[in-house]
Amino acid sequence: MTTIKKPLLMARELVSGYVSPGDTVVDATAGNGYDTLFLAELVGEQGKVYSFDIQSEAISRTTSKLLDANLLPRVRLICSGHENLASYLKEKVSAVMFNLGYLPGSDHSLVTRPETTLTALKASLEKLTPGGIITIVLYSGHAGGEEEKKIILDYCSKLDQNFYTVLFYGMINWKNHPPSLLAIEKKYIS
Ligand SMILES: C[S@@+](CC[C@H](N)C(=O)[O-])C[C@H]1O[C@@H](n2cnc3c(N)ncnc32)[C@H](O)[C@@H]1O
């Protein structure tokens, strides 16, 4: 039976079509480590995942998930803001995943912020290889979430269509601020 995928799962479905074994990719918000684990499986033994979070708790939760799956060697965990992405990444990447908001089961006031998210997004666009993808799962239910969503949507809606294709996806009849998804594909330019 087919059902409509929630934004989190749709993000993974999209990313899996853009990443090949051996690629370098980024999880911009490690959190509980689910996306980092997903990406580590996707890039295979020769690939590399850079995974950022500002909270040491998130880094340790992600580390233990990777250890359990025996995938830690493929991942560089960085306890720093994704706004510093450019200083850690020398190579181009085929995918960057953002999952904004707060760390579930932790301090809800420690959230992603529009200015730093925007800086990280701009750096990601620079580092993205043609034919690569950036996914951003947006939340609007927490303090500051609606503003962040608006600013990111506004920025992405103005990206030049000659260079990028931008998708917006979400459930428009769901109550209680359901998450939504932005996906940005960098086009091949001949
Ligand atoms: C919704 S959670 C991410 C969930 C994660 N993708 C997963 O699969 O479990 C958002 C995370 O963003 C982190 N965060 C907030 N500001 C950040 C920043 N400037 N750079 C990197 N991570 C940040 C938070 O600490 C939190 O862990």
Image (cartoon, rainbow, N blue to C red):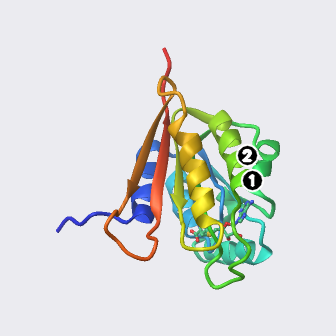
User: Mark 2 belongs to which amino acid?
Assistant: Thr
Please report the residue visible at 68 percent of the width from the left and 78 percent of the height from the top. 61
Question: Where is the N terminus found, in terms of image quarters?
Answer: bottom left
Can the viewer see residue 92?
no
Q: Number of numbered discs present? A: 2
Q: Is there a contact, CB below 8 Å, between mark 1 and mark 2?
A: yes
Q: Nearer the viewer, residue 147 or 168?
A: 147
Which percent across, then down, holds residue 186?
51, 33
Instruction: Name the outermost residue toward the left.
Output: 1
Viewed as shown, does residue 37 lie left or right of 190? right
Can the viewer see residue 80?
yes
Which percent across, then down, holds residue 19?
49, 45
Please report the residue visible at 42 percent of the width from the left and 49 percent of the height from the top. 168
The dot on residue 119 is: 2
Residue 74: image quadrant is bottom right
The local crowd at label 1, few if under 14, some if 14 to 19, many if 20 or more residues have their Cα within 10 Å, is some
Q: Nearer the viewer, residue 26 or 135?
A: 135
Which percent across, then down, holds residue 93?
62, 40
User: Mark 1 belongs to which amino acid?
Assistant: Thr
Residue 78: image quadrant is bottom right
Q: Nearer the viewer, residue 75 or 184?
A: 184
Please report the residue visible at 69 percent of the width from the left and 55 percent of the height from the top. 114
CB at disc 1 and ligand 1 closer than 8 Å: yes
The dot on residue 116 is: 1
Which percent across, then down, holds residue 62?
66, 72
Residue 46, relative to residue 79: is it above or below? above
